[in-house]
Image: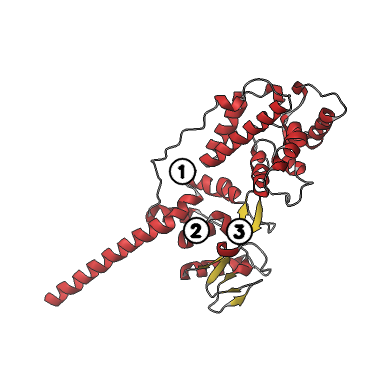
Amino acid sequence: MQNILESDSLISAPLEAALYVAGDGVVEGSTISVAAFVHKKFIPNHVELKSPAGQTHYHAILKHLVTPERVDHFFASYPGFATARLKAVPGWPYLDDVRLCDLTPNHVRQLVLSAALRGYSPQTVKHIRSVLGAIVNHAKKERVFDGENPISEVQLPQTSPNRSHELTVLQAKNLLKSMQYPEREIALLTISTGMNISEICALQWKHINLTWKSKPGDEDQVPSESCIVKKQWTGDKIIDLKGKRVRVVELPKPLLQELLQLKRNRQIVDEDQFLIATTEGHAMRPMDTLTMRLKPIGQRMGMPWISWQILRRAHQSLLSELRTRLTNELVLCTRSVEKEAMD
């Protein structure tokens, strides 16, 4: 298979699409590639009609069908779509140069299985299949695709809704021992505070107060030993939260010490920097922290099912288990004291 990143893909698809729409004649559907059709027909005539949230959704999911760099190129002229740091995944079955007439259920099946094996959530896998189906349906309207929509022959991977993975205290400790920055800090934050991954990856140091005094923020005071959740990742960009969605989260003492040490080690001076950042200082995408950091650790430890959502659920389940342990220890301690008094 040709390596798309080594080809002139960012040029060939737009040129092909330009030929497709030039003049009165229409090039036969067999000559138009998926990437060219997405660029010149699907985005302007379908995606543009959606709400801003819908456009963001398509921008994110299209990067699993067409190489991310090319999708960013397609959206470059649209306001609000900054170039994201999602890069092409080696070996991923992108459809850039696949001709519409050659699109088969096997292409859909490869995408669905690749997403499932990479640990994407069932919802994300479903979105990938659905967006490809929407592209084909639009191609039918444009009369450049004949026949059945290939997604109709591909079922989504079976999930086990009744099986719920829950972390024990021992598993959580073993995971944390195997982690380093940034997944360790994410895990500590989500387990101890219940913050979700989209909030954590958008958290800036200026919204974190590690001292016992309130400190001024950009608009609000940051209470002592707390952080303010004011932003979150949505799709491939960070958005500002409004109203009741902005909230203060208290930081436990052990977590405060961890974050203080992190701030010293990383020599943070600019408070606008993100807590979870790349070596270049950019905010890390939630999906990258999952696929590149957490999932490999889970595979090595025999927990391929691990996810940030499961770690977040542990915020309640582990607290409950710890409370039970503490109660048992207090009961045993009380019994020991009572026995000594009787003796």
Quarter containing the C terminus: bottom left
- Give the spatial CA distance, label 3 vs label 2: 13 Å
The mark tally for this picture is 3
Q: Which residue is mark 2?
A: 190
Q: Is residue 74 above or below residue 233?
A: above
User: Depth check: 32 or 340 in front?
Assistant: 32
- Report the residue at 84% width, 29% height from top: 19
> Residue 219 is drawn in which quadrant?
bottom right
User: Depth check: 30 or 176 in front?
Assistant: 30
Q: Residues within 10 Å of mark 2 (few under 14, many from 20)?
A: many
Q: Secondary structure at mark 2?
A: helix
Going from N to C along the chain, the mark reached first, 3 or 1, is 3
For residue 276, which numbered disc appears in the image? 3
Q: Residues within 10 Å of mark 1 (few under 14, many from 20)?
A: few
Residue 158 placed where, x, y %? Answer: 46, 33
- Report the residue at 38% width, 56% height from top: 317
Q: Which residue is mark 1?
A: 305
* 192 displayed left or right of 1: left
> Residue 232 is drawn in which quadrant?
bottom right
Identify the amino acid type marked 2. Answer: Thr
